[in-house]
Amino acid sequence: MQASLVFLQVSMSPSNPVRDTHPLLHRVDPEHGRRLEALPCDLVWATTWMNDANDVLAPRLGLPTLPVVDWPDSDEVGVLHWKTRGLVEWAQGRPFVWVDDEISDADQQWVSTHHPGPALLHRVDPRRGLTEHDFTVIESWLRRAR
């Protein structure tokens, strides 16, 4: 059986990742990298940062280069988040956790109807980022999903 996936979103736009001068990068907690890597899963960037997440964020977090969800141009209209369909497709039936600050009840419902495996859509408060509680919820879910 393949490992569960954890799709990671970053709540800030990569305004200038090449020069590493984004005004919110100081808020990235390097300790989160160790915590993320210790999770029993395969980590995947699910962010509009695309490969810039590997160039800028992964080194700050001490993470290796991670796979990146390649977002197609989306004309998604309505209450469903524009990432939802793409993440379910990318998961290909594997259990997954989606960590994001924009997850809604509509996304929860759509995933439960269209994804054949278990999934945890975990909403994170963008003002606080990942907290101890978030890590506990995610880790507990991953251990049960194995």
Image: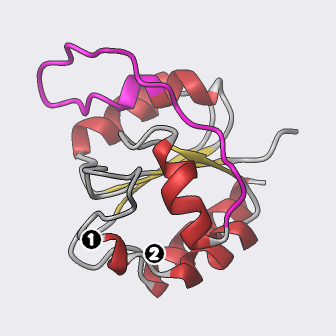
Q: Would you place residue 94 above or below residue 74 in this image?
A: below
Residue drawn at the location 44% of the way across and 34% of the way down:
112
Outermost residue on the left side: it is 78
Q: Is residue 71 magenta?
A: yes
Locate residue 30 relative to residue 131 in the image: left or right. Answer: right
Q: Is residue 68 magenta?
A: yes
Image position, residue 4 (x, y; %)? 71, 47
Q: Secondary structure at mark 2?
A: helix
Image position, residue 115 (x, y; %)? 53, 27
Q: Nearer the viewer, mark 1 or mark 2?
A: 1
Label for residue 134?
A: 2
Q: How is the image coloured?
A: secondary structure
Residue drawn at the location 67% of the way across and 61% of the way down:
142
Nearer-the-camera pick, 103 or 11: 11
Q: Judge the density around disc 1: few (<14), some (14-19), many (≥20) Cα neighbours within 10 Å.
A: few
Q: Quadrant of residue 119?
A: top right
Label for residue 24?
A: 1
Q: In which quadrant of the rendered image does the C terminus lie?
A: bottom right
Residue drawn at the location 28% of the way across and 63% of the way down:
22
Locate residue 98 relative to residue 81 in the image: left or right. Answer: right
Q: Would you place residue 139 above or below residue 72 in this image?
A: below
Q: Secondary structure at mark 1?
A: loop
Nearer-the-camera pick, 23 or 138: 23
Number of marks present in the image shown: 2
Q: Judge the density around disc 2: few (<14), some (14-19), many (≥20) Cα neighbours within 10 Å.
A: some
Q: Would you place residue 14 above or below residue 126 in this image?
A: above
- The Cα–Cα distance between marks 1 and 2, rounded to whole angstroms, is 20 Å
Nearer-the-camera pick, 5 or 63: 63
Locate residue 1 relative to residue 85 in the image: left or right. Answer: right
Decide which of tag 1 and tag 2 comes sooner along the chain: 1
Residues shaded magenta = 63-86
